[in-house]
Image: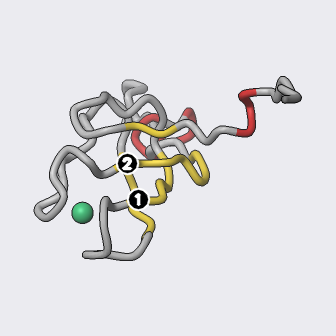
Amino acid sequence: MSEMLRKEAHVPEASKPGDKVKKSGIYSVRHHGPHASNHDVTCVAGKPFPACDECGENVRFVIVRTAPHVGNHAHFKGSRSNH
Ligand SMILES: [Zn+2]
């Protein structure tokens, strides 16, 4: 048996319900079982990933594309004094 050591970088980083969202962006949702196809959602950093109404804790979220929340972007902070 030949055991090729593959880089784990090829394994998509999947998050589960209750995990805190590390990066805002588009996530591909992988439901457990046939009740729903994969679909994309936007998740905001700092909030926990939600459980699915159907497959509960078995749903997984895989990052597709990060995109900073507009409120966290340097050009939209808006916290400088004279507004
Ligand atoms: Zn589901």
Front residue of 39 and 46:
39
Q: How crowded is mark 2: few (under 14 residues within 10 Å), some or many (20 or more)?
A: many
Query: Circle 1 sits in a helix, a strand or a loop, which is it?
Result: strand
Residue occupying image coordinates x 40% and y 57%: 42
Circle 2 sits on which residue? 60
The percent coordinates of residue 51 (x first, y second) are: 18, 48
Q: Residue at x 44, y 29 (%)?
A: 22
Q: In this view, does 39 lie to the left or right of 59?
A: right
The amino acid marked with disc number 1 is Arg
State which quadrant residue 54 falls in: bottom left
Q: Of residues 18 and 43, which is closer to you in this image?
A: 18
Q: Which amino acid does label 2 sit on?
A: Arg
Estimate the x, y position of residue 53 in percent, counting from the top left.
11, 61
Task: Estimate how packed mark 1 is, as few (under 14), some (14 to 19) or many (20 or more) residues with alpha carbons within 10 Å.
Answer: some
Here the colouring is secondary structure
Q: From the viewer's perspective, is residue 20 above or below residue 37? A: above
Can you give x and y, in whole percent of width and height, for residue 32 in the image? 31, 59
Where is the C terminus found, in terms of image quarters?
top left
Q: Between residue 43 and residue 28, name the one nearer to us.
A: 28
Extreme residue in the front direction: 1
Residue for badge 1 = 30
- Compared across the picture, whether 71 is left or right of 59 comes to right
Q: Which residue is drawn at 56% across and 40% down?
A: 75
Q: Is residue 28 above or below residue 74?
A: below
Q: Are marks 1 and 2 in contact (CB under 8 Å)?
A: yes
**Residue in the picture at 45% in, 34% down:** 72
Q: Write down which quadrant ligand 1 falls in.
A: bottom left
Q: Which of marks 1 and 2 is nearer the N terminus?
A: 1
Label 2 SS: strand
Picture layout, residue 73 above or below residue 27: above
